[in-house]
Amino acid sequence: MEVDKGKGEAEETRKVAEADRDTVTLKSSDGKLFEVSKEAAARLSTVLAGMIAGGSIDDNGTDLKQIGSEALENVVDYCNKHANSIPSAALISSSISFNTAPFKEPEEWERKFVDRLSHDALFDLVEAANFLGMERLLDVTCHKISEMMKGKSPDQIREVFNIKNDYTKEELEEIRQELAWAFYDD
Amino acid sequence: MPRRDVRSRREETARPGTEDRLGALPDEALQHLLSFLPSDDAVRTCVLARRWRDLWKSTPALRITEPECRWKKPEDMNEFVNHLLLLRNRSPLEICELNSYPYHTMSEQRDRPCRYIQLWIRYALAHKARMSVL
């Protein structure tokens, strides 16, 4: 766009163009740049919404030092997919008899989106969503982890998530006695 | 030897598949994900490791689903929910999902499964649960 104009004039044109830009550029901890729709970023992330409103978005790439490029790519991918998806009407399970329902079940594309992630990529994304204040993405990723825990014994859960049991035998016994009302089958 | 917390342990071990990424998440994230589990599963995570001991107490959800598959009799379910509500922290309850234990309307014991339901609903309302009766 910058043809033969005076320097000041060109600068002015660039500024105006960037103020009108409908994307924001985000920079991962390892220096990679990603572009995402300004509208989607502001709608899905409270942190990015605050930065956009406060004018602290850097046109050369807003530094997100906490987020690696793989996680940021997933964040941007999620924002783009979200912007293109049509929300479905029937979101609440019909079997629920009494429910406050603040959480809408993941949609088909959201399920696919988290299902394809590796174990580490899923956790990187939870951390990124938490850092960026992306409530829906946090819901969807945490929901996925809860599905991985569902119906499993404590030993199985420890194995899936590499949890080290740091209780002593006596402590465990004490907990089971204290919470006998929750361990009715044992 | 200095005490190693979860974060520093994570930095030390870069090998994939051996880290406890779940335990490294902040409390709020863990409480959030526990809120998706049926409440009895959520409470029982307390035995996983010390990190998990008290997380169930501030989980912002009461989810009682498929009670007939989880408790042998309605009294067991009543005991569970009464204990849970009594012992959890005074944190808000954002989600309340209650399925009643199945019962026959003609049975003489029909009041057993529903004995406390009104009480639980009042508890949920008092703890700021956003409710809708479906």
Image: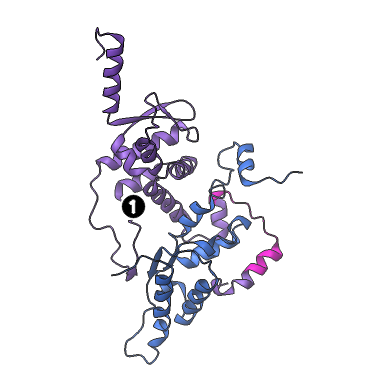
Across and down, in percent, residue A73 comes to 39, 33
As helix, strand or loop, the secondary structure at mark 1 comes to: loop
Identity of the residue drawn at 37% across and 73% down: B99
Across and down, in percent, residue B120 comes to 43, 76
Picture quadrant where residue A155 is located? bottom right
Chain letter for the part of the structure drawn in purple: A
In the rendered image of the structure, the colour used to display chain B is blue
In this picture, is B103 found above or below B43? below
Letter of the chain that mark 1 sits on in the rendering: A
Q: Determine whether, in the image, residue A94 is placed left or right of residue B114.
A: left
Work out whether residue B68 or residue B129 is closer to the camera in this orientation and state it: B129
* Residues in magenta, as a range: A160-175
* Residue type indicated by callout 1: Pro
Across and down, in percent, residue A48 comes to 38, 38
Picture quadrant where residue B21 is located? top right
Give the residue number, with chain letter if any, for mark 1. Answer: A106
